[in-house]
Image (spheres, rainbow, N blue to C red):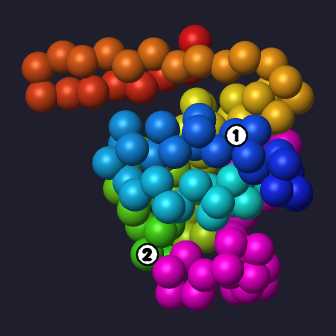
Amino acid sequence: MKNSTEFEQSKDYLEDLLLLHGVPKNLALLLFELLSYVNKDNQIVINAFIKKELAEKAKISKGTIDNALTKLKDSGLLERLDRGVYIPHSTLLKVPKLIKGNAVSFKVTYSKNKKEIEPI
């Protein structure tokens, strides 16, 4: 997931997910770039070098990345396993399909005091 065309193909999907999770949609590019670091175990390992790369790619500061990671974790879009190790929400793992031209969707279920978002 490296070029702007791929980002444009997934931008609306990512922005919608961010908004539904209460996170500013301007983090879509950072989230897109983060997904390029998902390993075979569906984990994202973030260290100082990765943060520097992300800052350059998303044109933001490393401090903004730290704040964004906290927001993404608090919203449930990322689950923190350990220091610097995250698992993306299952809906985020659909982005590569979207880039390949496939349709993707997710379901939002509302119940008393709760909103659940899951892939279909």
Say whether residue 47 is visible: no
* Residue at numbered disc 2: 67
Residue at left offset 83%, top offset 46%:
6
Which image quadrant for residue 55? bottom right
Task: Look at the image and tell me whether residue 110 can be seen.
Answer: yes
| Residue 68 in the image, given as x and y percentages of width and height | 47, 68
The front one of 116 and 95 is 95
Image height of 18 relative to 84, above or below:
above
Give the quarter of the image for residue 9.
top right
Q: Nearer the viewer, mark 2 or mark 1?
A: 1
In the rendered structure, the answer to whether residue 33 lies left or right of residue 21 reads right
Lower sequence index among marks 2 and 1: 1
**What secondary structure is found at the residue carrying circle 1?**
helix
Residue displayed at 52% across by 19% down = 106
Distance from disc 2 to disc 1, alpha carbons, whole Å, reads: 23 Å
**Residue 20, percent from left and from top:** 37, 37
What's under tag 2, amino acid-wise?
A: Asn
Side (left or right) of 83 relative to 4: left
State left or right for residue 17 relative to residue 22. right
Say if mark 2 contacts mark 1, CB within 8 Å. Answer: no
Give amino acid for label 1.
Answer: Ser
Q: Residue at x 85, y 24 (%)?
A: 101
Q: Nearer the viewer, residue 82 or 104?
A: 104
Give how far across and how far down residue 96 sits, in percent. Answer: 80, 35
Reply yes or no: does residue 111 show up in magenta. Answer: no
Is residue 40 covered in magenta? yes
**Residue for point 27% across, 27% down:** 115
Q: Which residues are magenta?
A: 37-65
How far from the left and from the top, in percent, is residue 74? 35, 56
Where on the picture, by quarter, is residue 2? bottom right
Residue 10, label in figure: 1
Crowd band around label 1 with a 10 angstrom C-alpha radius: few (<14), some (14–19), many (20+): many
